[in-house]
């Protein structure tokens, strides 16, 4: 007992006498880079579609199926990808998944030289490789949420999960301009080679620099660990090298929880609107607003700039509101502010005559949507800290992103673009209202950890 007291006193002295290391912020930087490179890999085919159609004589319908192949893998593999991160650790899973989509991306540039194009034909080969890219990218979001759960501590979860949103915004901002320029200078295949190379570099960062828990990282000192784990008990249990989660997450509790179902349905609404910007916003600017191609490329990046700026602000505010009002009311307040502003701005922008005013309104609508988004991911950690990867994967599977391109095209064709954006604003408002039923303080876990040695 005296030895324990001496050890505890020595640890307290080490903490008070040293400055905290900053490894956690380097880990968050790698999270940003991972999502930025993944977004580049996701968007490059859409940007380069014209070159590929011209070279291989693919029709619009064929190209549509190649685009769809990504989503057919991306959403279903969210749940197994998140569960694998809970079971085997996000460092290992992210390294393997990034290498998978990097290899598939490089393979696209090698078509039709590869044997797969002779076996399946060119169109099916493209679709198969895009399916593999979707499979590889699927674990990224739930596993980065798992990284945040381990590295940012209970008081910075909102800010931590906002970093992966910043990565998406960063990739979406620079991908159209950079990929277009590179394709013109070096050809479309160079874009896929470079995207693959960036993926390999990020995978190496995960493998050689990161760790699943700060306790495992040689660069983390006691002072930084004390900031991440304010409670010594928290540091010595679920994050100890000798502890592993049980085989199965608490699916029964998750799927019978009112909070979880309200969160899933609201996330469907939240995920709908951003994919309008990914798929249709450029066409809307050119065909409806009358912008030139060059103007469309410039103004088309404004929503992603707004996302980069407002996502971390929303993450910080979510944590601030939790400290002020508690988990339930704090997360709710952030969602209500973000989604409420997003719905109003989206509706106002769609009805505005001035192009500049309308585009700025619509860009801010995207930014405020992601101001709120961090609260969904942080709530997954709040509800199931040990199995946040599994719950995050389940939630991301429910995203309405897959419906947005189809529904927007249908409504715009039959009723006009203003109605299509009004429908997105209505879904955004519904997503906010559903948070009445979400209680982030509702812990869904029991003692789900067992010792690996026992």
Image (cartoon, rainbow, N blue to C red):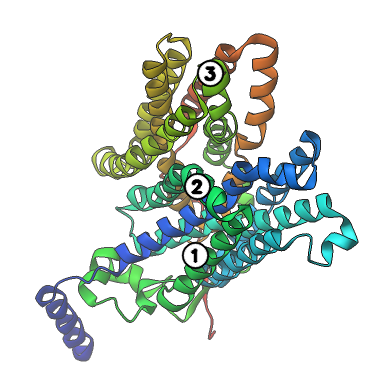
Q: Is residue 429 left or right of residue 196?
A: left
Foreground of the two, 180 or 124:
180
> Residue at image x 39%, y 79%?
216
Q: Are marks 3 and 2 in contact (CB under 8 Å)?
A: no
Labels 3, 2: front one: 2
Element marked by disc 1: loop
Upstream in the sequence, badge 1 or badge 3?
3
The answer to whether one can see residue 3 in this image is yes
- What residue does disc 1 label? 447
Q: Where is residue 371 in the image (x, y as percent from the top left)?
A: 37, 36
Tally the marks: 3
- What residue does disc 3 label? 426
> Residue at image x 18%, y 89%?
2
Q: In this view, does 225 lie to the left or right of 427?
A: left
Foreground of the two, 247 or 37:
37
- What residue does disc 2 label? 181
Element marked by disc 2: helix
Quadrant of residue 27 in the image?
Answer: bottom left
Residue extending furthest right? Answer: 119
């Amino acid at each position: 007992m005296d030895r324990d007291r001496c050890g505890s006193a020595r640890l307290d002295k080490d903490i008070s006498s040293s400055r905290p290391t900053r490894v956690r912020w380097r880990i968050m930087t790698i999270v940003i880079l991972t999502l930025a490179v993944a977004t580049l890999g996701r968007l490059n085919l859409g940007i380069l579609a014209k070159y590929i159609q011209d070279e291989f004589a693919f029709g619009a319908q064929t190209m549509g199926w190649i685009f769809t192949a990504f989503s057919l893998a991306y959403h279903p593999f969210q749940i197994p990808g998140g569960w694998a991160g809970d079971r085997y650790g996000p460092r290992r899973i992210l390294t393997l998944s990034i290498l998978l989509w990097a290899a598939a991306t490089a393979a696209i540039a090698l078509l039709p030289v590869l044997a797969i194009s002779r076996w399946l034909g060119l169109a099916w080969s493209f679709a198969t490789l895009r399916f593999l890219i979707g499979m590889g990218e699927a674990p990224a979001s739930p596993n980065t949420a798992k990284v945040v759960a381990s590295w940012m501590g209970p008081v910075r979860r909102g800010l931590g999960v906002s970093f992966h949103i910043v990565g998406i915004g960063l990739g979406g901002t620079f991908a159209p301009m950079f990929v277009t320029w590179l394709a013109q200078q070096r050809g479309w295949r160079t874009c896929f080679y470079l995207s693959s190379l960036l993926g390999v570099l990020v995978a190496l960062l995960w493998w050689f620099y990161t760790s699943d828990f700060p306790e495992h990282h040689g660069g983390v000192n006691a002072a930084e660990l004390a900031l991440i784990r304010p409670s010594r008990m928290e540091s010595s249990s679920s994050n100890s090298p000798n502890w592993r989660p049980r085989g199965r997450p608490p699916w029964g509790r998750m799927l019978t929880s009112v909070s979880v179902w309200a969160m899933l349905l609201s996330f469907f609404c939240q995920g709908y609107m951003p994919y309008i910007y990914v798929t249709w916003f450029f066409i809307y600017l050119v065909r409806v607003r009358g912008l030139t191609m060059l103007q469309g490329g410039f103004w088309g990046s404004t929503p992603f700039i707004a996302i980069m700026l407002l996502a971390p602000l929303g993450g910080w505010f979510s944590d601030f509101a939790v400290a002020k009002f508690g988990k339930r009311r704090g997360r709710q307040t952030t969602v209500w502010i973000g989604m409420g502003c997003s719905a109003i701005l989206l509706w106002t922008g769609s009805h505005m005559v001035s192009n500049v005013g309308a585009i700025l309104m619509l860009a801010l609508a995207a930014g405020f949507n992601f101001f709120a988004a961090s609260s969904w991911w942080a709530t997954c950690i709040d509800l199931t800290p040990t199995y946040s990867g599994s719950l995050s994967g389940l939630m991301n599977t429910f995203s309405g992103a897959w419906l947005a391109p189809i529904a927007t095209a249908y409504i715009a064709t039959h009723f006009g673009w203003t109605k299509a954006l009004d429908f997105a604003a209505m879904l955004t408002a519904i997503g906010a209202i559903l948070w009445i039923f979400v209680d982030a303080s509702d812990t869904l876990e029991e003692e789900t950890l067992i010792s690996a040695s026992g």
